[in-house]
Amino acid sequence: MILDRRFSFLFSFVIILFVILACCRSGFNQEEILSLEKSETDEEFISEKIALGKQLFFDKRLSRTNSISCASCHVPAFAFTDRKSLSEGVDGRKTTRNSPSILNAKFLKTVMFDAHINSLEQQVIVPIQEHQEMDMKMGELIQKLKSIPEYSEAAKKYYGREFDPFVLTRSIAAFERTLTSMNSRFDKYIKGEESQLSNEEIKGYKLFSEKLYCTQCHLVGHFTTFNAENNGLYRDYKLDKGRFRIFNDTNDIGKFKVPSLRNIELTFPYMHDGSLASLEDVILHYERGGKGHLNQSKIIQPFRLSSKEKKQLILFLKSLTDTSYMAEYRSTNQ
């Protein structure tokens, strides 16, 4: 446990150090870049910073080829996923994983499937520089965005500084923290509006919370523990070993962060690699008790559900859908 904490700290330090060095080579003053560790956003000009972050989020100029933006992989209509088994970057390059939803990102304790990055500010850096995603060198990107009068003026006005990685990461993270989806029919039911769920959906909820072991990983509320677990998706994780790639700890092979089940109706295909196309496929995987990998969580055990019970469970899962966040995107065609 102590060793894992040291590795986690070391990894976070390396990420921040890399950004500092990259920016220093470009001649930027990065005395405040270490505050990327901080997840809070300054109160002053907060609405303007959020608006700036939103504009950056949808700007394809953040990629090397000006062809993809953050929103290319996090589409509002798809609960900020892209509904692809494996996401695509510049030049049609395939990543090794799909895009998780960033709705309710402000509640995340860790970011990414490996559950190893501690803040949204740090996470912003990763897809921008990743070869298979936006493939943009940070120094070149800052010069590119700094040359755009609108961005340059906003940085000076709202942050009191030149446009730099601090402005970029803080703005996008501020926008991402506004993306909430916590008002589903199930939420209203829990608050006392019993008519929000049908009898079949309530039965599905009881299956989820009482008969099965679902709530051990998908706690009611955020519907995740935020931890990385091996759910036995494969017996041999050849293509993607999960969290192992971060710490080289064999105990981490096959471990991926438990995703939230909120809006699961909209975020197919499922699992880190999109290998399960439907909710029926997901239930069947768990019903079989996983593939039995050495690191598979002991929580995952076989069970039996009737066809009717499976339908009830799926009906409950669909009651977690909340698209109220889409109001502003419908009006802006984004």
Image: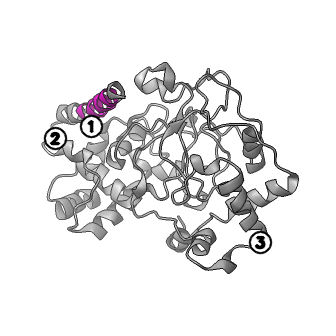
The residue labelled by disc 2 is 28
Say which quarter of the image contains residue 183: bottom right
Q: Nearer the viewer, residue 61 or 138?
A: 138
Label 2 to label 1: alpha-carbon separation: 9 Å
Q: Are marks 2 and 1 in contact (CB under 8 Å)?
A: yes
Q: Main secondary structure of the magenta part?
A: helix
Q: Give the amino acid at mark 1.
A: Gly
Label 2 to label 3: alpha-carbon separation: 60 Å
Q: How dense is the environment of label 1, judged by Cα within 10 Å: few (below 14), some, or many (20 and up)?
A: some
Task: Say whether residue 16 is left or right of residue 252.
Answer: left
Q: How dense is the environment of label 2, judged by Cα within 10 Å: few (below 14), some, or many (20 and up)?
A: some
Q: Are marks 2 and 3 in contact (CB under 8 Å)?
A: no
Q: Tell which circle, 3 or 1, labels the residue nearer the N-terminal end.
A: 1
Q: Residue at x 68, y 23 (%)?
A: 235
Res. 167 in view: yes
Q: Residue at x 30, y 38 (%)?
A: 138
The answer to whether 189 is drawn above or below residue 164 in the figure is below
Where are the magenta residues, as a range? 5-18
Asked whether 17 falls inside the magenta stretch, the response is yes
Residue 247 location (% of width, % of height): 41, 24
SS of the residue at dot 3? helix
- Residue, far right: 307
The residue labelled by disc 3 is 199
Q: Give the amino acid at mark 3.
A: Asn
Q: Nearer the viewer, mark 3 or mark 1?
A: 3
Q: Tell which circle, 2 or 1, labels the residue nearer the N-terminal end.
A: 2
Res. 147 in view: no
